[in-house]
Image (spheres, rainbow, N blue to C red):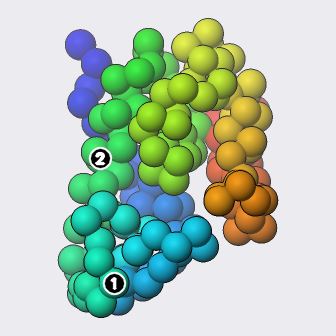
Amino acid sequence: MARKTRLVGTVGAAAIALVGAWEGLRLTAYRDVIGVPTVCYGETYGVKLGDKHTKAECNAMLLASLKKHERGMRKCLKNPDAIPGKSYVAFVSLTYNIGVGGFCRSTARKRLDRGDVKGACDAATWFKKAGGRTIRGLVNRRAAEHRLCLEDLK
C-alpha cells in the first residue's frame, strides 16, 4: 500500500526549506505579484488583507499546506513512491506553487507516470508565468527545483 506522506524526516525538512526559501515569510497579509491576498509562506486560501500570523503559526500552516498539496499530487500519480526523494521534493514544491489541478494536468505529471523522471523535471521548468507574464522569481525558482530534481538521477 502506498504511504500517505513522504514529508517526514529529511524529505519533509527539505520540502519546508525549499518552499519556505522561495516563498519567503511575510507575517502580515499583502497582495502578491498578481494581486491575490497572501500571507506567511505564500498562503492564499481564505486570506484577507490585514491578516497577521506569528512565525510559529506560519510554520504550522506551511507544513499542513505542503501535506495537503502532496496528497493531491499523490492522487493523480500512478506510482508516487517510485519518484526519487529529491525529485519528489521538487514536485511537491511545484504543486504547492501551481496548485494540485495545475500539477495533475501537467506534462510533468504525465512524464512521471511514464517513468520519465528527467523529462518530468524538464517539463516542470515551464511554469514561470503569473498573470500571463514571465516572472524572474519563478524562473529562478524553477531552475532551483530543476537542479534538485535531477540530483538523485545522476
Q: Nearer the viewer, residue 147 or 139?
A: 139
Amino acid type, residue under disc 2 in the picture? Lys
- Where 63 sits versus 74, above or below? below
Residue 112 image position (x, y, % from top left): 59, 20
Give the position of the N terminus as an image quadrant: top left
Secondary structure beneath disc 2? helix
Q: Residue at x 48, y 79 (%)?
A: 31
Few, some or many C-alpha atoms within 10 Å of disc 2 (few <14, some 14-19, many ≥20)?
A: many
Residue 49 shows which numbered tag? 1
Amino acid type, residue under disc 1 in the picture? Leu
Q: Residue at x 33, y 84 (%)?
A: 49
What whole-number distance in Å separates the C-alpha atoms at marks 1 and 2? 25 Å
In contact (CB < 8 Å): disc 1 and disc 2: no
Residue 81 shows which numbered tag? none
Q: Who comes first in sequence, dot 1 or dot 2?
A: 1
131 with respect to 122 (left or right): left
Q: Hey, which quadrant is residue 110 in on the image?
A: top right
Q: Residue at x 30, y 89 (%)?
A: 50
Secondary structure beneath disc 1? loop
- Where 17 sits versus 128, above or below? below
| Residue indicated by mark 2 | 67
- Where 43 sits versus 66, above or below? below
Few, some or many C-alpha atoms within 10 Å of disc 1 (few <14, some 14-19, many ≥20)?
A: few
Q: Is residue 139 visible?
A: yes
Q: Nearer the viewer, residue 92 or 106?
A: 106
Foreground label between 1 and 2: 1
53 with respect to 84 (left or right): left
127 with respect to 60 (left or right): right
Q: Residue at x 40, y 74 (%)?
A: 37
Residue 146 image position (x, y, % from top left): 71, 46
Residue 145 image position (x, y, % from top left): 65, 50
